Image: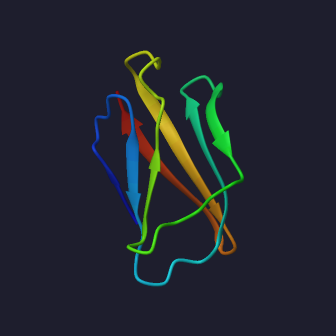
Amino acid sequence: MSVYPNPFSDKIYLQFDDNPSPILKISLTGMGGKKIFETEQVEISEDGSLSIKGLDLCEHGIYYLHVIHEQGVSTIKVFK
């Protein structure tokens, strides 16, 4: 899985490998643990990509993107 752009401005794109395990939840949290975004309605497009929009109100800083799937949790540090 790759995440771009990093740093982001108003949206984040996720590109998954050929056969990603089903995604159960995606969340974005700030350094203090405050949830900025969370969804359990995850639909990956046919090309294996997903976008998270509406992040333009986030302050500049460091965030953690948590992708929860059947095999565990992937956490990626992203910057704004």
- Furthest toward the bottom, the residue is 19
| Colour mapping | rainbow
Residue 77, placed above or below residue 16: above
Q: Is residue 13 left or right of residue 24?
A: left
User: Which quarter of the rendered picture does the C terminus lie within?
Assistant: top left
Residue drawn at point x = 51 percent, y = 39 percent = 64
Q: Which residue is more in the foreground, 65 or 38?
A: 38
Give the image quarter of residue 67: bottom right
Q: Quadrant of residue 69?
A: bottom right
Q: Position of residue 75 (x, y in %)?
A: 52, 52
**Total numbered labels placed on residues in the image:** 0
Quarter of the rendering occupied by the N terminus: bottom left
Q: In the rendered image of this protein, does residue 16 appear above or below residue 30?
A: below
x, y percent for residue 18: 41, 83
Left or right: 72 in relation to 9: right
Q: Judge whether 21 appears above or below 72 on screen.
A: below
Q: Residue 10: x and y, percent?
A: 37, 29
Q: Position of residue 3 (x, y in %)?
A: 36, 53
Residue at 69%, 73% (x, y): give it: 70
Q: Residue at x 41, y 22 (%)?
A: 56
Residue plotted at (61% across, 34% down): 37
